[in-house]
Image (cartoon, grey):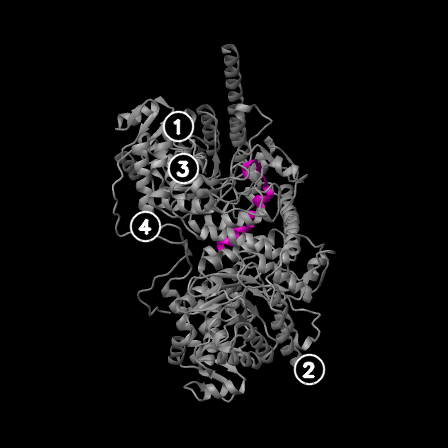
Amino acid sequence: MMSTQTNQIVNQTSQFSILSEDQKERIFEGMIETLRDTGVHLHHDQARDLLKEHGALVDGVSVKIPQNLILDALATVPPVTIVQSWDGSKKTRIEKNQVLFGPGPTPPNFTDPHTLERRKYVRNDASLVARVCEALPNIGFVQSLGTISDVTVSLADVYEFAEMIQNTTKPILSWSYTRDTCRDIHQIAIAMAGGEEAFKQCPNYVFYGEPISPLLSDFHAMDKAMYNAQHGIPQVYTPCCIGGGTVPATHAGQLVCAFSESMLGVVVAQLINPGTCVIMGGVQSIMDMQYSVYAYGAPELSLLSAALTEMAQYAGLPMFSTAGCTDTKVLDPQGAIEAATSVHSAMLSGANFIHDVGYFESGMTGSVLQLVMADELIGMSHVVAKGIEVNEETLSVNEICNAGPGGAYLDTDHTKKYASAFWKPTLMDRQSYEDWAAEGKKTMKDRVIEKTRDIIANFEGPISKVPEAARQKIAEILQAAEEREAQKAEADNKGS
Amino acid sequence: MLEKTMLIKMNQQVYGTTMFQILTDDQIEQIYFAALDVLEISGGLVFHAKALELFGNSDALVTDTNRVRIPNAMVEQALGSCPSKSNLTGRNGKRSIKLQKNEVAFGSGADAHFVYDRKTGERRKFTLADLEAAARIVDYLPRLDFCMSYGRVSDAPNAAVYDRYQFLAIIKNSTKPLVVTSIDVNGLKDQWKMACLISGGEKKFRLSPLFANYITSDSPLTSNTEIVDQLLFAADKGIPTIYSPCSGLGVNAPATIAGVLVQTLADALLTMVMCYLQKPGMPLILGGVQTIMDKDNKTLSFGSPELHLASAAGTEIYKWLGLLSASPGGCTDSKVVDEQAASESVMSIYNSFMTGTNLIHHLGCLDSGLNGSLSGLVMCDEIIGMIKQIGKGIAVTDETLALDILQEIGPGGEFLSHDHTYDHWKEWFRPTIIDRSNFEVWSEAGSKSYNERLEPEVDRILESHKPEPLDQRLIQEMKKIINLSDKKEV
């Protein structure tokens, strides 16, 4: 039917906003002023020289960055970056308002999905987490939820990546200790892509690096950022800012600080390789003053993350945000409350990579149970976030008039067409009390554990599709890395 | 440091709160026009004699099958006289709830048939003692604003007038404004009479109503006689009324969210016009349970995201029309206070709060509203605190930008010991049952899960909280009203 309407503005999705244009402008100006007047401490000679060459004021480790350098850097960041999975099956777009959820990196502990006890994270857990992520429909990227404790300590990052990339086709956000292991990971990714050219065409992972709050970048953080910029590897350069600890207790001040800390990475990366993808953001929350704990479940995390996302969008940068995490120590309603709150906020904000889904205990423990539960919450949140389609057919005036007052809508063509779009829960129970009781009065926790164990036992993931050549190459890379680290250790011993 | 001179910053527009919007004005208008079409083309079914007479004497068309078709001009006229502002006032005279655009209040649920016995853990019928306990908890909880008659009591001295006993039970135990349910118009009349005793007369009640009456309808666009009785009495007396049609998507309503919104709005507008014809000016609070149903099409889901979406959009429509809104929130399909109850409560409270729903009811209700949980109320209180913290938005001022402090402390420094931190950290949300201690501290305290911390808090409130007592003479007067009806309704 031909439309007879004109002048219609439509919300294609729900709209959510914390900051007005004027508020964003002031925070943006605050970032410019901070980098210009307060500056940063940068512990990397080469990076300081580069910045000095382009007009920054360098004094010892202090670097003050003039605004033109910042504006020039923002002018060359790419509006769209595409990451492709190693088997070519998935393309992930990094662009404004394109939302993905995933776990976070590096907690020392892991909730064992079988014993439910807290224990050290081991090598097998990395492949397990990758497989669980692969199985969950609302998880869009992969991080490890732990630091491997049972391999050569300085290579935990490389083993983790090697395990994960063979067990998932979703993009991995990797991290590394040094430029060396950063290169190892890059080499593994090239092996999986089937060669350097293929990787250059379309990278198959994103690197995650972290400056130190407030306003400080250590040697390794910057060194890795420079490596990734040189090689065109999309990278996250984001701090963990602790409100009232490493940054001001007021949210506006925290946003200025977080923004400034990421901008240093953006500026250096764009000077090295204009057009390379750098993602801002980070973990933004407050210090719990009762327990001196960095609160991963605080509502302030949701508020700050959504606001910083708006700043990223304002600046034209992609955003690395945080949600689905909790301060609880076990799977319980607290974990659900905190995850649901942050997941919905992050979803509505439109951040790109929303990480730390599955963190327990303020980031000290990774839990696939929390991850599996959050997957359901993401699905639920999306129903509200995607909004309402309003058109002649969905308005259903004919259906309502045909049915008449108190009329029935079951089994009409209109119902058949649209009822299939209802959200289908996998962990939420909607049975009658009697049916529920007859099935053993299971709580959601029981169902989360069942679903998690079922995935672990029965979902194989893409490991069998990994080409033999890539598998061998990875073994060689790991072997060479072991030899290098052994030599380093020997040199260190001699030195001391 | 730069010299501080007076800074004049002009043309600044800030978000005083977080902003959330599902529909544009154009989309809302489409829904409104569609609802007007439904009222003109199809209309509603009315059986009530007085209501049929009112419609018959108006410009509406009344058919011999009791179908009432309403020209949109009548709707627009009625809209003009429907209050955009009212209030609810507790028995201590505090006008604690502002019923006006973007003001949000939270309260417990309604008429749950069951409760979990706190000693045995077994499910059993709701009693007057449970209702009193629930009212005391609502009275205590700082973020709950109104007290609803939480359970359908099974042990009223006279079951035919149970609603009066429920009223007495909650008014004795809570100073917060009430939302009540009524068996029929006589139940409403008695509760209104009791409220007038406390308010100090009919006109004082009209100025500062002590309660709102909650009416549900499970057959959209069909006004059953009992409901109309109550509505017309409420219109006469200016009793705030929550009108809440219950619609199952694809069962008794279209399967699209836009469609169910059209149907619910048409139903609401029909009701509004009817009340207007009786007497203009009744505070009508529009809501509804618009959700999907279980596989047997018997039970409405109280936790589905479709409910959250439709409720929030409904509020937007009523705001746009200058009307007052209500929706369910903090309720769940789960049978226990578990991760599902927590998640569904968060999602509903989040969306209904951010969208600015006036009265968010059914907090703490489990099992699609069949079970009233005292623990659920306490959990929701904390959730509301968290959501309100996000709803506050972010102040952007020289003080909060803190650029001077940042410069003073500089790269690599710490803010913990700075006065600026001391001045501002108290603005953060502080949890009560949620625990942020580290693993060691938590283990030493007995490795307690959320539920294991929640239950003792419920016990503590029940043991320690004593609501401000209600004047014994008033209680005696109210009992007289109940006794009169007791004798009539046997």
Closer to the camera: disc 4 or disc 1?
Answer: 4
Give residue A21's mark. Answer: 4
Tell me where residue B247 sits by quadrant: bottom right
- Across and down, in percent, residue A173 comes to 47, 36
How packed mark 4 is, by other alpha carbons closer than 10 Å (few <14, some 14-19, many 20 or more), is some
Task: Indicate the chain on which mark 4 is placed.
Answer: A
- Across and down, in percent, residue A460 comes to 60, 40
Residue A336 in the figure: left or right of residue B10: right
Residue extending furthest right? B120
Give residue B487's mark. Answer: 2
Dominant SS of magenta comes to helix
Magenta stretch?
A: A362-382
Callouts 2 and 1 on one subunit: no
Foreground: B293 or B46? B46
Identified by mark 4, the residue type is: Glu
Where A129 falls versus B466 (above or below)?
A: above
Q: CA distance from mark 3 to mark 4?
A: 35 Å
How packed mark 3 is, by other alpha carbons closer than 10 Å (few <14, some 14-19, many 20 or more), is some
Residue A281 shows in this picture: no
User: Is disc 4 placed on a helix, strand or loop?
Assistant: helix
Q: CA distance from mark 1 to mark 3?
A: 24 Å
* Residue corresponding to mark 1: A222
User: Is disc 3 placed on a helix, strand or loop?
Assistant: loop
Closer to the camera: disc 1 or disc 3?
Answer: 1
User: Is disc 1 placed on a helix, strand or loop?
Assistant: helix
